[in-house]
Image (cartoon, helix red, strand yellow):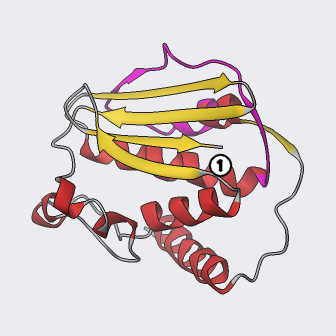
Amino acid sequence: QGERLDRLVGDLFTLARLEEGAFGPVPDAEVDLDELVLEQVEHLKGRRLDLSGLSAARVHGDAGQLASVVRNLVENAGRHASETVRVSVATEGKVARMVVEDDGPGILPDQRSVVFERFGRSEEARSRDHGGAGLGLPLAARIVARHGGTLELGDSELGGARFVVTL
């Protein structure tokens, strides 16, 4: 519980700093997106993990912040999945795309903007005790935007939510 609380406070602090524009320019360091995925999925327990679409992808940015994006999306998928979480990474020219999806109940279209607001949670998440605080997805969206990318939410062919990060 102490670690969880520490991370929540850290996420809230980072989110506030991102919203204030307190960070300088994004570092130009090379980051292996596929390596971040492999590091973060190690913590996913009790779910079938499909990494068949994982290939090498290198982006430029802040490795710690990008790891936070991956961690938050993977944990969110794991929290809502019935059985399966699928993560894929691919490149198309100079663009890297990471897709995180699950076979859970998904997010209704009218709830999709809410999950990117600070402390926003979908009705499904509120009705079940998933332990989320409503900070992970807003933090991920702001980090991706800071890196000049996009984070989109849609329906997965698995039946749940599909988050697509483009950098």
- Give the quadrant of the C terminus: top right
The residue sitting at the left extreme is: 127
The residue positioned 31% from the left and 43% from the top of the image is 154
Residue 112 found in image quarter: bottom left
Left or right of 138, for residue 126: left
Question: Can residue 111 be seen from the camera position used here?
Answer: yes
Q: What residue does disc 1 label? A: 67
The residue sitting at the front extreme is: 93
- Give the quadrant of the N terminus: bottom left
Residue 122: x, y in percent? 21, 63
The residue sitting at the right extreme is: 28
19 over 33 or under it: above or below: below
Q: Residue type at mark 1?
A: Ala
Residue 107: x, y in percent? 21, 51
Kindly state the secondary structure of the residue where label 1 is placed.
Answer: helix
Q: Is residue 54 magenta?
A: yes
The residue sitting at the top extreme is: 52
User: In the rendered structure, which segment of residues is drawn in magenta?
Assistant: 38-62
Left or right of 111, for residue 115: right
